[in-house]
Image (cartoon, rainbow, N blue to C red):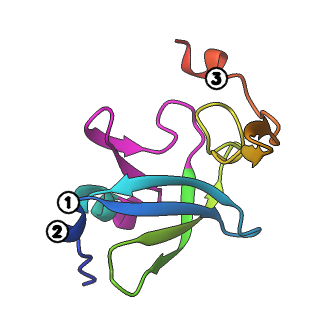
Amino acid sequence: MVKLDFAKGGGLLPAIAQDWKTGEVLMLAYINEEAWNETLKTGNATYWTRSRQKLWRKGEESGNVQKVKEIYVDCDEDTVIFKVEQIGGAACHEGYPSCFFRKYENGELKVVGERVFDPAKVYKK
């Protein structure tokens, strides 16, 4: 059994979600040991939300699930990359394919991505 070093990060490890076909970085989140085990068990990316302090099954509200195709672990065993199939086309809660939809340019942030869905309609908040 793989044993990641959760102690180093106070129980949390960075988890990078990357499109398994294109290599595009979709998002960065965190996992704890419970999220890691849930991901391994279900094959769907599961994270720990620091703001809500609970397990976060990606897509549980939006339907934009991440099917894990491959997992890479860094040399220190304290960071993972989930290579995923992004169901629904959007990883970002703001409706973009990637959370990295803004580019720093000339001292400003410029939106370079295109929205896939309207978050107000999907999350009904």
Q: Quadrant of the N terminus?
A: bottom left
Would residue 89 be seen by someone viewing this image from the given angle?
no
Residue located 40% across and 59% down the image: 42
| Above-or-below relation of 123 to 56 | above
Residue located 56% across and 47% down the image: 65
Would residue 88 be seen by someone viewing this image from the given angle?
yes
The numbered dot on residue 109 is none
Q: Which segment is the magenta one?
A: 39-65
Label pair 1/2, CB-CB below 8 angstroms: yes
The numbered dot on residue 119 is 3
Residue located 28% across and 83% down the image: 2
Left or right: where does residue 32 sit relative to residue 121?
Answer: left
Left or right: where does residue 37 sit relative to residue 30?
Answer: left
Q: Amino acid at mark 1?
A: Gly
110 part of magenta stretch: no
Label pair 3/2, CB-CB below 8 angstroms: no
Q: Dot 3: within a 10 Å radius of its alpha carbon, few (fewer than 14), some, or many (20 or more) residues? A: some
| Above-or-below relation of 91 to 52 | below
